[in-house]
Each structure stands twice: as structure tokens, then as C-alpha cells.
Amino acid sequence: GHFYRLPTEAEWEYACRAGSDTAYSFGNDAAALADHAWSFENSAEGYENTQSHKVGLKKPNAWGLHDMHGNVWEWVLGRHDGGYVTLGAGTVVNPMTLPQAPWDQVVRGGSWNDDPPDLRSAARRAANHDWQASDPQLPKSLWFTTDAKWVGFRLVRPKNVPSAEEMHR
């Protein structure tokens, strides 16, 4: 009975930073990532054994949110090509930019399969059609990413319920 959605890129980064202006929500020292994130370096021994982990096993950010850095890249509402990054500094009323083509979506936060630069608060990656190469559906699903075990999502529930028109948009 409630409305949930993916966060926008701006909402995701705001939540990830938790008031910080550093590379990571806890500062600029990538050596401290092991306390806050699952990455390629600490997720398991050897590539074939690396995997996502149960949420909450690492330290949260200043706002109590776990796994904003690493574990899995997270889908966000936004467009990779010419989207969020072109908005610039300052106040933006509606920072959501809708994808203009299939696979123009964005994931944020890095994963257990990535190195420290990809786990920064500002890190973003374009979705890739190869992520669903094994999808058995015809036509292939927009969100069924059978070959991207390092991609997940988190949901937000807006304080004010949007109109039906806004929900469908």
C-alpha cells in the first residue's frame, strides 16, 4: 500500500555522502575502505570466490546507511549519457534525468568486484547490455541482469506521496 522507487542519482549521492565532501563518506583515505565496504580486496580469496555479502556487516556512514560503498552497484533513476554530471553545482529543482535509450541507465557505489576508485561517493557506471546476455526471456527484460551479480538496488519511499501521473512517469 506504499509507493517505493529507486533513488535519483542526486538522492543516492546525497545519502552516500552523509554530509561529507570527501571521496568516501568517511574521508579520503582508501585504506579505511576495509572497515566500510566490500571490495575486490576483501570480499574473498580469488576472483571466482568473490561475491556480495549480507548488508550491515561493515560500518555505516554518518547517517547510519550501510553498504553505500561497495558490496553491489545500485540502480538509480538517471541517465548515464549527459545526465546528472552535466547539471553542475548549485541548486537544481529536479535533478532526475530520464534515460534516452536502452542501457543508458546508471548504477552507483561500486561493488565487491571493484577497486577503491570505483567505490567513491561520486563513482558511477553506465549499465551494459552484456549484463543480461544469459537472460532467457524474449524479448530480454529491461532489469533482469543475469550476468551482473554485482548489481543490486535499494528503494526509497518519498515523504510526500506523488500523484498517479508522477508515479507513472
Image (spheres, helix red, strand yellow):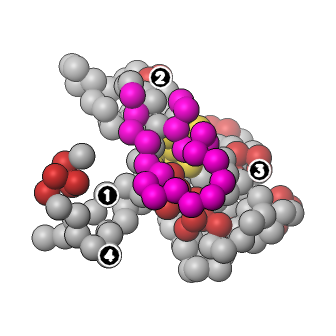
Residue span colored magenta: 81-100
Q: Residue at image x 32%, y 75%?
A: 159
Task: Say which amino acid is labelled 2.
Answer: Asp
- Horizontal relation, residue 156 to residue 19: left or right: left
Q: Are marks 1 and 2 in contact (CB under 8 Å)?
A: no
Distance between the alpha carbons at the discs numbered 4 and 2: 36 Å
Query: Dot 4, how many residues are within 10 Å of its Cα: few (below 14), some (14-19), or many (20+)?
Result: few
Characterize the magenta stretch by its predominant secondary structure.
loop
Task: Say which amino acid is labelled 3.
Answer: Pro
List the residue tagged with mark 4. Answer: 159
Task: Say which amino acid is labelled 4.
Answer: Lys
Q: Are marks 1 and 3 in contact (CB under 8 Å)?
A: no
Counting from the top left corner in percent of width and height, residue 107 is at 51, 44
List the residue tagged with mark 3. Answer: 116
Distance between the alpha carbons at the discs numbered 4 and 3: 33 Å
Distance between the alpha carbons at the discs numbered 1 and 3: 28 Å
The answer to which of marks 1 and 4 sits earlier in the sequence is 1
As drawn, 24 above or below 48: below
The answer to which of marks 1 and 2 sits earlier in the sequence is 1
Distance between the alpha carbons at the discs numbered 1 and 4: 12 Å
Label 3 SS: helix
Counting from the top left corner in percent of width and height, residue 9 is at 51, 52
Discs 4/3, front = 4
Distance between the alpha carbons at the discs numbered 3 and 2: 23 Å
Which quadrant of the structure image shows residue 16?
A: bottom right
Would residue 80 be seen by someone viewing this image from the given angle? yes
